[in-house]
Image (tube, helix red, strand yellow):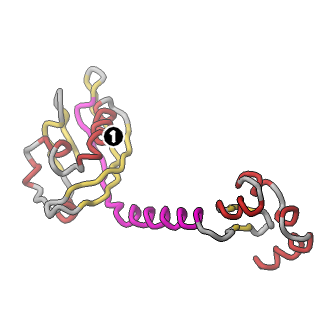
Amino acid sequence: YIANFGEQRVTSSWHLPPDFEALTGYPQAYFQNDGSLWASPLIHPDDMAKVEAHISLLRNGQKSEVEYRLVNADGTTTWVQDLGQGTNKKDGRALEGYGVVRDISDRKATEKKLLLTQRSIDQAGIDILWIGPDATILYANEAACRTRGYSAETLRSVAPHTIFLDARFQEGWPAHWA
């Protein structure tokens, strides 16, 4: 996108990529002569403050990166990453901003699943330890900490055989990674 900045708001978004309509369901003409692209119902209300901060940085001629949700014409949401830069300064203010918006919905869905998995492992009722190739503890869930009476930080700082296994573990563990 390329945006022309006015005193109070983006006065016109005068270049949007052809795939913008496919991304949002809104025709390009809807925004072509209307500067309310970033103030429209296109931006999810919960993300408006982030977008306004992004625009402020662009207006000041800075680079900015922000992730936010678009509300599509059909009411669904699309997560996007917006990488922008303000340019063509006059009196310290940017006259234009340009940037790239890309769909990150798949990544956000994956992050949500990973967070759920992490929380499930953290709160599982059984001991879970992740042990690296060098036989060091990389992760210990809450149950493992309770069972052994150590904090996760302490468990990560000591060799596993000193806590719950014999010395043969340390010697034989690398073979599991070969």
Label 1, secondary structure: give it. Answer: strand
- Per the rendered image, the range of residues in magenta is 94-123
Q: Can you say which quadrant of the picture contains the C terminus?
A: bottom right
Q: Nearer the viewer, residue 72 or 57?
A: 72
The percent position of residue 10, horizontal first and vertical second, equals: 18, 37
What residue is drawn where x is 38% and y is 39%?
63
Q: Could you classify mark 1 by the number of other residues whose Cα lies within 10 Å: few (under 14), some (14-19), or many (20 or more)?
A: many
Asked if residue 177 lies left or right of residue 14, the reply is: right
Residue type, mark 1 in image: Gln
What residue is drawn where x is 19% and y is 65%?
22
Asked if residue 122 lies left or right of residue 100, the reply is: right
What residue is drawn where x is 67% and y is 69%?
128
The answer to whether residue 37 of the structure is visible from this angle is yes
Prevalent SS, magenta region = helix
**How many numbered circles are shown?**
1
The percent position of residue 177, horizontal first and vertical second, equals: 76, 76
The percent position of residue 122, horizontal first and vertical second, equals: 59, 62
The percent position of residue 133, horizontal first and vertical second, equals: 76, 69
What residue is drawn where x is 33% and y is 44%?
84
Q: Which residue is mark 1?
A: 85
The answer to whether residue 18 of the structure is visible from this angle is no
